[in-house]
Amino acid sequence: MTDELFTISTLIGILHSCVRLATPYLFASLGETFGQRSGVLNLGVDGIMLMGAFFAFYVVFEGHNLWVGVLAAIVVGMLMGLLKAFVSVTMQALQGISGIGLYLFGLGLSSLLFKTLIGSVEGVSGFRQVGIPFVSDLPGIGHIFFNHNALVYLAYIMVPVSWFVINRTTLGLKIRAVGHNPEAADTLGVSVNGVRYATMMIGGALAGVAGASLSIGLQNVFQENMTNGLGFIAVALVYFGSWRTVGVLAGSLLFSLVNALQLWVQALGIPVPSEVAVMMPYVMTIVVLAFTARQIQKPAALARSYERGE
Amino acid sequence: MLRRISLLTLVLLFLLAACGRSDRDADANTEGTNEEPFRVAIVLPSSTTDIAWSQSMFDSLKDVQASMGGEEALRIAFSEGMFRVTDASAAIRDYASEGFDLVIAHGAQYGNSVFEVASDFPETSFAWGTSSDTGAERGITNVFAYGAAANEGGYVNGVVASMLTQSEIVGVIGPVAGDAKLYIDGFIRGVTGVKPDAQVNVTYTGSFSDTSLAAEAAHVHIQAGADVLTGSAQQVVGAIGVASENGIPWLGTQSDQISLGPEVVVTNQVYDWANVIDDMIAKISADEFGGTAYTLTFENGGLRLEFNEAIDIPDDVKDAARAAIEDIKSGAVEQFSDE
């Protein structure tokens, strides 16, 4: 039976699953990277994802275009980010606690809206798998990378885009400055709070799309608490990736690869207890974290609020 | 300082908003009538709309309420999403002290809490499941227990799967190993009873609510050649979405799942708890507060197999399913050992 795992078609299947599974993690953890690079820890990602998932689903459920659904998720995500920024930046709340508050708020509100506006679990027709012309016909690679739905492609496009914004633009320079030394940035005329508001809204928008990728991309359904803590793993992946976009990409892919692998191991009837299989991604995460824990890139002002003149 | 206080208020507001989702008295606005309504409180591990375990009980309660004459006759209070046993335990105690006639703890994980509270409130009835333990051995007389012979519907769905599959590979998406074992064992028996060479691939996600992983598991099964799928717990909503997208037949269990995949859900094993609830209410009204263990079966009408009327199911498949149900009722199918 173990031989089956190493056949070409199974390996292609595993990698194809891996690329797809990484989608929500990528959106959410790239968004969280923006926030953390500017010095704001947002533990509320899961709550924002739930709100994004709900609104994207609701808009599509009401008969609107899928991209209008994505737009709704972006707008709701930005509003949630704005709320987080108000509490953490303007009101200077402890970032960890207020993030948990935001999570519970998103969890509760999305459930309440779902109960009142929809009432029962329904399906919609979401983004379909679309092969990219020519490249999707390439043997192996074509299926693995170029046979997914639009939101999967978008998630991977966001990796270089995020890298570019953080490392090659003025806004990115300000974000990094504010995250490392807000006092110095302030004396140079950078609005610390302004930048942090911006990163919270960017992060919120991406978390919203992460939610949409579940409700109108990968599952085409909305259920209460459907993210099931995925947003918290996304926060961990930012640490895992040492606050770099490439690191976040690697973390998302590795975590998803092990998840895909364990599903295949079970489906092929390879005699590994399912409890062990299910544990694999988490064990892997801890092991990698233990060996690669580098704090070099960690924003010095992470989770510290900034008040002028202190 | 002012900032901190206003901040604290905000956080509290968040928490309040979050708490709003549970602990709601569904029928709080009932107008008072002369006759006291029967009052039932229920604690559910997941949502009342999980299209699985919790919804099956909640829908049955609503049915009983309707047949008894509405809110004047039966009042229902519920707490959903009580996946943390400590929260559930507190809710059970609250309902008991508020004087509800019957407090239902809808999860095997709530057993210890039920017995603990039941011994403090001997005048209140409690019910819990999945279990057959009414606490009689401990001298407790006010607890009912209930469960479903999920293996029976599993067997029938297995027979249906064996007739629908062309590839002779069938995929099963389970939550946590052990919990869904009864259904899955019955299902495998049904498939291999008709087609001994058919292959049943079983995956567990390790969670009741991980819809993402369940969805991916459905993709994996399809790529591994499965052309009929089934699964259990509220996580399956993700998997049914994937089955719909790929036009793969899905066999449902616990609650009515047709709305999620109107074109692919072929059959549903539905848990109907109405008879159990009716019987408990009758017993409590006659001052019998517990001691009975119920099991839903095809024989007693607690299990029902529903066909999706909207799709064209071949007659021989329907006939085979009906025959399997009759075989179970008549005992022609050898008794399921771990019932």
Image (tube, coloured by chain):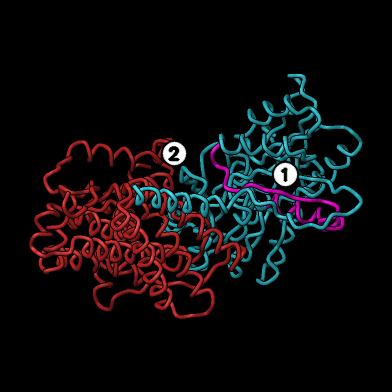
Chain B color in figure? cyan
Q: Which residue is mark 2?
A: A274
Mark 1 falls on what kind of element? strand
Task: Give x and y (percent) for residue A26.
Answer: 29, 59
Most foreground residue, B249 or A32: A32
Q: Residue furthest top?
A: B138
Q: Is residue A283 left or right of residue A61?
A: left
Residue neighbourhood size for the residue with mark 2, other residues' Cα within 10 Å, grouped as few (<14), some (14–19), many (≥20) = many
The residue type indicated by label 2 comes to: Ser
Chain A color in figure? red
Q: Is residue A136 left or right of residue A58?
A: left
The residue type indicated by label 1 comes to: Ala
Q: Which residue is mark 1?
A: B41
Task: Give x and y (percent) for residue B212.
Answer: 43, 55
Q: Is residue B242 left or right of residue B232?
A: left
Per the model, the C-alpha gap separating discs 1 and 2 is 36 Å
The reply to whether residue B252 is in sight is no
Mark 2 falls on what kind of element? helix
Q: Residue at x 70, y 69 (%)?
A: B309
In this rendering, the answer to whether B206 lies above or below A60 is above
